[in-house]
Image: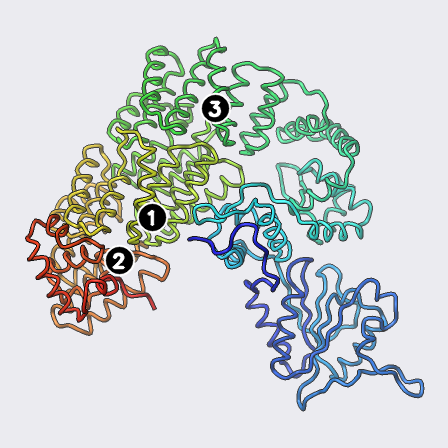
Amino acid sequence: MTTTRPVGSPRPASPWPLLGREAELAEAARALRDPLGSGVLVAGASGTGRSRLAHECWRQAGRRGHPELRVTATPAARSVPLGALAHLLRPGTDGAPPALGATGQAPGRRPVLLLDDAHHLDPDSIGLLTSWLRTRRVALIATADTHRPPGWPDLPLHRVLLRALPQEVVADLVERTLGGVVEHKTVRMLHQASGGRPRDLRELVDGAVRQRTLVPEDGLWRLVGPLSPTPRLRALIEARLRHLDPQHRRLLERLAVCGRLPLDPPDRAAARSLAAEGWLCTVEEGPHTCAELAGPLYGYVLRETLPVQRSRRILRDQARRAGDQDTGPAGLLRSVRWRLDAADGVDPDEVERAVVLARRAQDHGVALRLARELARLRPRPRSLLLLAEELYEGGEPQEAERTVRRALDESTRDDERLAAVVLHTQSLAFGLLRLDEAFALNATARQTYAGHPDEPVLGAHESALWSLVGDVRQAERAWREVAPEPGSRADVVAAVPRVYCLAESGRTGDAVRAARRSRAARRPCAAADTMVHPALLVGAEARALAEAGSLATAEELARQGYDLAVDAGAGSAQTWLAEHLGWICYLRGRLHESRIWYASTLAHAREVGLRSGEWVGWCGQALAAAVCGDVDRAAQCWEEARSLRPGHWWRPEAAMVTAWLTAATGRLVRARGVALDAAAAAGRRGLRTAQSHLLCDAARLGAAAEAERPLRELAAGSDSALVAARAGLAQGLASDRPDRLERSARQLASLGAGLLAAESWTAAATAHARADAGGSAQAAQAHALAVLGSDSGACTPGLVPSSVRSRLTARELEVALAAASGLGNKEIAGHLSIAVRTVGNHLQRVYSKLEIAHRTALRTALRPPAPR
């Protein structure tokens, strides 16, 4: 999607949309209308939008005819008796207290008083307001801080509590404000930084747009720099800090400088109080209860207020405490980091242990920083290898290449050289797409290290290379030669490609079980293993579940894996998890989401220099665009993908793009041929699952008769419910029997394959219409619209409305689709091997049957109807 507002343009002055508060607003409005109640108290932490919700409720009451009164209590007015209410009062007579002034009250309409920040109200104002409420002079809408309730007596006020907004609401809110799609990673970072508080979220978004760190790239808004608080947000946080108890502030300063800390007994009461006020949160870490700041903004502001020398004193003091009390692995990692931050000397052995611990904790930001320090203190091959891997993961491939080459040049030990070869080969294959060099380097190393205890690692890596280029049979051969011990380094390296190979060979149940075994047995390795980040095993399991037909479960698991990779700062894992989500959404027929995830794949791959990820991102976008009928975008993305792909790299995605792009340009005969030829090639490489997909695509494009039998054979040899459902669809299309097509549609819908189910329902509707079963046709077409959903964007031959398909012959429909795509009569005749005059005759009959006057109306007539 193209965003509508240029980067750096002023933000709108009007309030943001009130999203995610519909239930609370309705609850407050009901309570305000209660004739026996006194009103509503909207409570929430600072920044949760309590004033906004109360104001909206107040305005609704005004629109119903209630007179509107407004008061804002402030700390300054608190020192003046009745200071907050003074502007509403008329002086009393004969010594009587002041009373509520004229309000223009309508019959049966109490004035509604909006009182913001009721916790600042002075005692005299509380007393007077209480009397008004008890005598029903006014109805009240008050706001107060959750942790500072107002000091009035117990009144019949309905309490509405506002909590932080969930991540999905933050996504909707930011997308509506920016006028475009926002990358999922960016949404997650905004949600974590703001804590789900609408005020903080708006400040962060406004500041990031102004600073050009939140920008639209390829139709996707994404962060390209760090988030930092705006001056206004910084001032608001500083104002809250000024009211803290000194002991509480000191604890927050320690957390801001040191990060997560085990709580000493004297600090636990302060931590409970600060947690209740939303400043920090507590987590269990082994035997320790630890505390950390509730959001990065607090740390940012606190560190800004601390002089450098004070920060270093805090770090040194905390390092001493850790040496005495926190002796576990996490304590060592914290101690090393603190001493480095304090500019103190640290033993290289301790730094190396800390690097390994940071990698085990999947904290790649800390691991990279420590690895740089280790390479500076002790520039040995092992240190350089650790640094090279973290550089790859951190998106600095050129420096990583220089570092790994230096490690290769300087290493004298076999295990170090072998690890360097594996890392370099991974870089050549996955990072740079120089596959010939990668295979050659790996083969040479296997000869050199034949018989070496670590030689199976190279064999496992060869299996990974074959799976990358799309040859399951060769990958399986390499796997059998290695036969690695469970839990060994070779087993870890081959874990992800092993799952892929099992799934593609039709053994999806074995693939899921293998992924789960690998996840359960995963032991963090000290050697370089970027390509086997734990999130990648989650993604492999999700991909296997999707190919098995458990699409909803697969999507949920892939989202969990993606969030894990984002939180760990694992760039390559983010790339592949985004790619899995793009594919899963494609299988589910949600093409709009699929295009978004593939755009994220491309963005992540660029960040970390992963050219294989770039190819997949461009290819996925091209495929989804082609199925949506967006020919120009599909052609552009496909050209970008082809510019990256090595000549001998064969992947089924490429054939799918070619087939659907050919179909989108009206050449259905050629598209069917492409899909059938690619299916045969996939079979020769052992890609049985991809073969079933390509055969199903051929059937959807009109070659059901040719695809039916091989699909049935694939289904018989596979445990995948999705492969079986594809075979059922091909059978239904080949037979043109409505009962088979409806059975196929229900099966596909139960798996979550919405687009295929919609096409099957449409084909069933067409068959019913041809049999003059109008009621059944309408019902089937309604099912097609329901299962497709409103955000699919698909535009395939199988979605042409049954009211159109039933009136046209197969040849007339083919000619009509070609003409609608923009092809001329001569081009159509060439593609279909018929005379130009015959094309013209077909088109005239099409115009007559569809009751349209000319060629330009064809596109509209053939498009799938919009879901209701």
| Quarter in which the C terminus is drawn | bottom left
Task: Report how far apart the C-alphas of labels 3 and 2 lie in the structure.
Answer: 45 Å
Camera-side residue: 692 or 180?
Answer: 180
222 in relation to 428, above or below? below
In the picture, the disc for residue 528 is 3
Q: Amino acid at mark 2?
A: Ala
Q: Are marks 2 and 1 in contact (CB under 8 Å)?
A: no
Mark closest to the chain's N terminus, 1 or 3: 3
Mark closest to the chain's N terminus, 3 or 2: 3
In the picture, the disc for residue 757 is 2
Mark closest to the chain's N terminus, 2 or 1: 1
In x, y percent, where is residue 198?
61, 58
At label 2, counting other C-alpha atoms closer than 10 Å, the crowd grade (few under 14, some 14-19, many 20 or more) is many
Task: Report how far apart the C-alphas of labels 1 and 3 lie in the structure.
Answer: 39 Å
Q: Amino acid at mark 3?
A: Ala
Camera-side residue: 193 or 604?
Answer: 604
Asked if residue 145 lies left or right of residue 547, the reply is right
Question: Mark 1 = which residue?
Answer: 633
At label 3, counting other C-alpha atoms closer than 10 Å, the crowd grade (few under 14, some 14-19, many 20 or more) is some
Residue 64 falls in image quadrant? bottom right
Q: Amino acid at mark 1?
A: Arg
Q: Residue at x 51, y 52 (%)?
A: 6
Camera-side residue: 90 or 216?
Answer: 216
**Which dot, 2 or 1, sits closer to the camera?**
1
